[in-house]
Image (cartoon, rainbow, N blue to C red):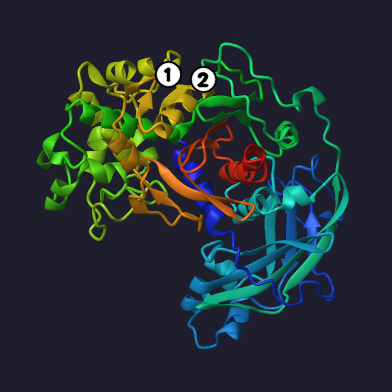
Amino acid sequence: MKSNYLFILITCLLLSCKNSGQSKSSNTSSNEIENLFFSTVDFTKAKISSEAYSKNFDLHNDNFLSIVFTLDKPLIKSLQELAPNLSEEELLSKGNFQFSYLIDGKLIYVENLNTGAGPKTRKTEMLKQVVPLVAPERIGFWGWYMWQRFMKVNGGLDAFTEGNHTLSIEIKPYLKDGTLKVGPLLAKGSIAVKVPKIYIDENLVPVQKIQPNSGWEIAKDNFDNNKIEALNRKIVEGRFEDINSIVVIKDGKLLIEEYFNDATRDSLHNPRSVGKSFASTILGIAIKDEFVKDENALLKDFYDLKSYKNYSAKKDSVTLKSLLTMSSGFLGNDWDNDSPGTEDKMQSTDNWVKFTLDLPMHKDKIIGKDYNYFTAGSNLLGDIIHKSVPNGLVSYGDKKLFAPLGITEYKWFHTPQNVAYTGGGIELRAIDFAKYGQLYKNKGLWNGKQILTKEWVEKSLAKQVSQNYGGIKGMHYGYLFWNRVYTVNDKDYEVSFCTGNGGNKIFIFKDIPFVIVITASAYNKPGSHANVDKMMIDYILPAILK
């Protein structure tokens, strides 16, 4: 929905700045005098002076944390020492501060700060640097995002176990010009951190018993209860934020069904962009029923493109397949706030189809090859389906998809033209999302009825377009489905999946007999997707692969 861009931005910030190949350079435990100071004062209301420096930080009860350090010379001078032959502009485009986070003397995380973080004057003129890290609400400052990456994605939360710890931060200049160069220490400092005990309801930790009338046959297979209970504890403690449900299907049978944070089996979950995949499904059914010729049909077959703004001959070449694979070439990218074709901009208009068709084409993008995350294109598919099938998308989808799956409880969001929103606007129960995933695991077959053709399922889950997303292994895009690889105990497991803001997932594994649904409401929160990855790699997959 409208908040999808925020989620995408946050996710990109999390992943693009996670430098797994960072230089764990010399002087990490240097004995130089400490010249970096911490403060727990509310930096939104008061300037931080030396009188406000703090020696102690309560991880759960202090709402604010900042660091203050003063350089001997502007950062640009340190970057020049790393590459004397580069211009100032080149240095600023290739370098910035490197932050190292240590807990009790152990290096936990190193971040080479994105070169775009911070204004030019901070790097070329300023000596005194004030960096807000912690606030009770998200703030538009790179330091807050960096702290979130450290804590939620890169081990900070797990290292801060109950008790007393020492947090140290070290800052150096770095430059990446082919190879990574790291300069000498610029600042370092430490603070004592208290981590209070988290009190929880222990009754919420044991594996939840599957209740009757799920609509599924119950699996009799064993799994590692201890792993799932350890996961449940982390969820109840809030280590994994706002998880609402976990459903695991093995060989078409219900193995695990758990609910958290006041969710129940009857709860309808809003999985945001998971709903995009349903556009692919219903289009596949419409093609099977011959209401749409095939995915190679052209956009111009459905709209008079010349009657919209920014017409070009290139727009005539846009296919439904290119919309399914987010490679249509429209000048729209939800991961770029400056793009004219973001979901937020679309939803601020009163006609989302017209908004999309009015967009210009990208002059350099190759249709069918170059990926851009383009929610408006997914919504366009919904409109095409709606005008092509009998009685519109909602009625057709109910008759051809939901009714055969036995799904009666669901809710569509709608566009201003009262068409079901296929950019990410459908709510189902978690066990019904599992039915949807199992349909794909079954190659389109459900209770003896071929709802989707096997060919469409295979195309949908195939690696249609390369996707370099945060360096994740095996990342590709299909027909509004994603592909990746999870590695557990040195073994790779390929999986296709739907994904949505907040940590919502439907996983369909290729070579192992599992469909896994996770619903969550950590909307726009940094680390929501990384949390799900950690849940899968450290807990769920090890438990069920036992």
Report the Cα–Cα distance between label 1 and label 2.
8 Å
Q: Is residue 467 visible?
A: yes
Quadrant location of residue 110?
A: bottom right
Would you say 148 lies left or right of 188 here?
left
**Residue 479 pos. (x, y %):** 33, 41
Disc 1 crowd, CA 10 A, few/some/many (<14, 14-19, 20+): some
The tag earlier along the polypeptide, 1 or 2, is: 2
Q: Is residue 138 visible?
A: no
Would you say 41 lies left or right of 324 here?
right
Q: Residue 498 or 110: which is nearer the viewer?
A: 498
The dot on residue 411 is: 1
Q: Residue 90 or 43: which is nearer the viewer?
A: 90
The residue type indicated by label 2 comes to Leu
Location of residue 498 with respect to 290 vertically, above or below: below
Q: Residue at the location (37% across, 39% down)? A: 343
From the image, tell me which residue sits under label 2.
Answer: 268
For this orientation, the residue located farthest to the top is 213
